């Protein structure tokens, strides 16, 4: 396995994939990036719209990876006492010998996230339900189900097959009306593809000094 644990500039850890020459998060700060892109510009933005959400709030993550986003959402749900159903796709799970060595193990919830069975809905706390699937995004067939999609695939330069119009169409269809997709990526072709499948595309300042990020709304 070509994965190595790295420490990013805010002190939080991420992984580096040697084969892809790609990190799982920004080297400027794994935790800082995840909180900004997915919690603040995704989940909290959705709630700020004050539309009538069905409960629980339903999130789909593309790429469970280290489990950092999942842990941050679980923590958010418990602190804010808002029920969240978190579905996450990961066809290539990080092996135990890697996640087991990460600093995030100091939080017992991190191990629970990794040990949770695949293809089952598991209530991990009063307000946090998890569904992990090894299905790739290419197999996503849900319709009108999610409020927010965390599009956290590897960069288009590394995994262009994930950022296709067909996959973005799947994401669009799987969102409820008014739902949002949020991602660190602001590549031109990606923005055009998002718009072409129906998203209203917004460009926002990026995380931790990065110029731009993108949010799409259905
Ligand atoms: C940038 S990392 C995700 C980081 C993760 N969200 C975290 O908090 O650590 C991208 C992830 O997408 C996964 N992935 C690769 N191909 C995929 C596919 N076809 N569908 C869904 N996920 C995929 C990779 O295995 C990798 O774990």
Image (cartoon, helix red, strand yellow):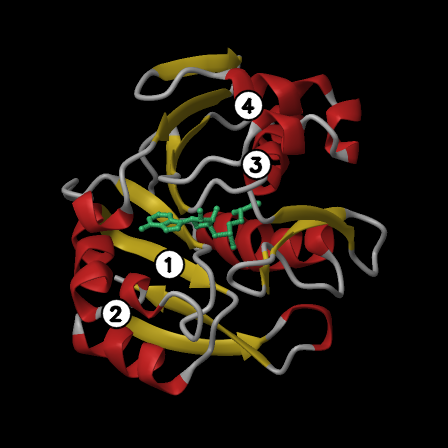
Distance (Cα) linking label 2 and label 4: 31 Å
**In contact (CB < 8 Å): disc 2 and disc 1:** yes
Numbered circle sitting on residue 199: 2
In this view, the mark in front (3 or 1)? 3
Q: Quadrant of the C terminus?
A: bottom left
Give the quadrant of residue 117: top left
Question: Whole-percent x and y of residue 198?
Answer: 18, 71
Determine if residue 51 is in view: no
Numbered circle sitting on residue 181: 1
Label 1 C-beta lies within 8 Å of the nearest ligand 1 atom: no
Above or below for 62 versus 41: above
Q: Residue at x 41, y 14 (%)?
A: 122
Return the disc, 3 or 2, that comes first in the chain's sequence. 3
In this view, the mark in front (2 or 4)? 4
In this view, the mark in front (4 or 1)? 4
Above or below for 203 versus 148: below
Q: Which residue is mark 4?
A: 113
Label 3 C-beta lies within 8 Å of the nearest ligand 1 atom: yes
Give the camera-side residue of 19 and 186: 19
């Amino acid at each position: 396995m070509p994965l190595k644990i790295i420490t990013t500039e805010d002190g939080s850890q991420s992984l580096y994939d040697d084969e892809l020459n790609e990190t799982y998060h920004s080297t400027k700060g794994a935790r800082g990036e995840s909180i900004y892109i997915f919690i603040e510009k995704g989940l909290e933005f959705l709630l700020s719209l004050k539309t009538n959400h069905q409960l629980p709030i339903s999130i789909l993550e593309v790429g469970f990876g280290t489990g950092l986003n999942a842990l941050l959402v679980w923590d958010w749900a418990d602190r804010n006492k808002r029920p969240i159903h978190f579905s996450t796709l990961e066809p290539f799970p990080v092996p135990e010998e890697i996640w087991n060595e990460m600093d995030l193990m100091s939080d017992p919830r991190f191990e629970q996230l990794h040990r949770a069975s695949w293809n089952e809905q598991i209530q991990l706390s009063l307000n946090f339900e998890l569904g992990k699937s090894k299905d790739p995004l290419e197999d996503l067939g849900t319709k009108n189900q999610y409020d927010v999609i965390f599009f956290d695939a590897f960069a288009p330069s590394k995994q262009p097959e994930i950022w296709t119009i067909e996959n973005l169409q799947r994401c669009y269809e799987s969102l409820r009306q008014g739902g949002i997709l949020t991602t660190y990526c602001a590549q031109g072709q990606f923005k055009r593809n998002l718009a072409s499948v129906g998203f209203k595309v917004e460009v926002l300042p990026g995380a931790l000094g990065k110029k731009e990020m993108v949010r799409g709304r259905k």
